[in-house]
Image (cartoon, grey):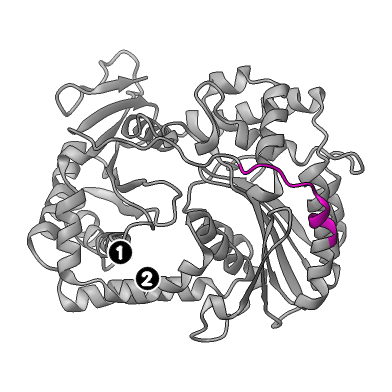
Amino acid sequence: MRGPGSEMRPAIAGILSCILSGLLLSLPSEAMMKEHVYEEVLPNGLKVLLMENHKAPVVTFQVWYRVGSRNEEWGKTGLSHMLEHMMFKGTKTVLPEEISRIIQENGGNDNAFTSADFTAYFENISADRVSIPIRLESDRMQNLTLRKKDFDTERLVVMEERRLRTDDNPQAYLSEQLEATAFQVQPYHWPTIGWMEDIRRFTLEDLKAYYHTYYNPVNAFLVVVGDFKKELILPQIRETFGAIPGGPAPEQRRDQEEPQCGERRLLVRKEAQLPALLIGYHVPNLREPDCYALEVLAAVLSGGKSSRFYLDLVQEKQLALSADADYSLTSHDPGLFSLSAEVFPGRKPGDVEAALDLEVERLQKEAVGERELEKAKNQLEAEFVYAQDSLFYQAMLLAQYEIAGDWKIADDYVPSVRKVTAQDIVRVAKKYLVPDNRTVGVLLPLPTDKSRPAPQAPFGDSRIIR
């Protein structure tokens, strides 16, 4: 979103669904997405996804562009996020910041967000006024005005956002550095917001070229969910968006990582309250069948207060204030399976890592019990279904699966999770959660008393980042 927090990873869906609690509407029980979604590709290449839901007179209108930080290049990181900011600076017919004012005056809200894999813009508005976002979004898809004055001002805003969200946030900084170490070839190497030096030096001409390359109907799709009639809204979309000239589809293939040949480690020393630990293992995404076993594995480890991490590390041993396992199922490229922990006061990061390792070894040696496995599956299914009470999240879900490959794959989620066996979890734990396939990052707080010596690295030779 514009302002702090604009850059977002694939976990964004859960955060954004919370801020739109006013759009709580239910999908018919046991419904399959493909039974309720209409898909059409306009002659200029723009894909349109429509899902009618008449429980309340509201609509979420979303425009997704297949461009994020993965589409950038060395020396020009942060262009996707910067362009997201500039998309609110007006067009040939709309003044700067007027888009948001128009939406708000009509009782709606709007915003945007950027990730490694996409940039998206949305408006939530009364159903009888859906023609307003249709007009505004089609206009800025083709008529954006990029002014030097706006560019110079917004660049300072983005630089301050980076300082606030990353440079001054020890755990966010640790995560950024871990990804930069884990990914050496793949564009997930750099952060969505970009490196500070790149933000300082890219130009307005760079931004203009980026806009004309990626903000192209063939590189975008619309997702509209809510109280509308397809027969009425589709002609409006065809007339406005269909009139935008199409162009060549940008190349989306990117270099991929070679298999990691040994553990990588890094140490970050930053002003912080407590030490933290972050471990990332290279894993496949939705394009590989192992993804669903990894999804269930993450739920077994950290799915709530009855999970293994909470019971062992937090409650019983009191080694960590919090511990989590995270997996990005719908990332465009293969990503990381991450284990993280905030170290309990007075405890050592090395002890926390040893405890995490024991939990991983347990998964590799002992099959998860039937009751524990069923609980993890039930939890994932409930989260998946209940999240769709939100119109906004219904649209988000369609879009995220479309970015990952095809929106129709969303219908496979619950059946595929249900098919995961205890032996599948043992197999993927042995295959992916191994030391040679991981990167370990440790955050050590700088001492508050500058006269005291800095803490020593707890693990042999480490890459030290100040």
- Kindly identify which residue carries mark 2: 380
Residue 327 in percent (x, y) is at 35, 54
- Kindly identify which residue carries mark 1: 299
Q: Any magenta on residue 294? A: no
The reply to whether callout 2 and callout 1 are in contact (CB within 8 Å) is yes
- Left or right relative to 424: residue 408: right
Residue 106 or residue 316, whichever sits in front: 106
Residue drawn 45% across the image and 37% down it: 254
- Left or right relative to 110: residue 136: right
Quarter holding residue 422: bottom left
Residue at the left extreme of this rendering: 365
Q: Secondary structure at mark 2?
A: helix
Q: Which disc is residue 259 wearing?
A: none
Quarter holding residue 348: top left
Q: Is residue 168 visible?
A: no
Residue 373 or residue 454, whichever sits in front: 373
Q: Which residues are magenta?
A: 239-249
Residue drawn 63% across the image and 71% down it: 391
Residue drawn 90% across the image and 39% down it: 92
Q: Earlier in the sequence, mark 2 or mark 1?
A: 1
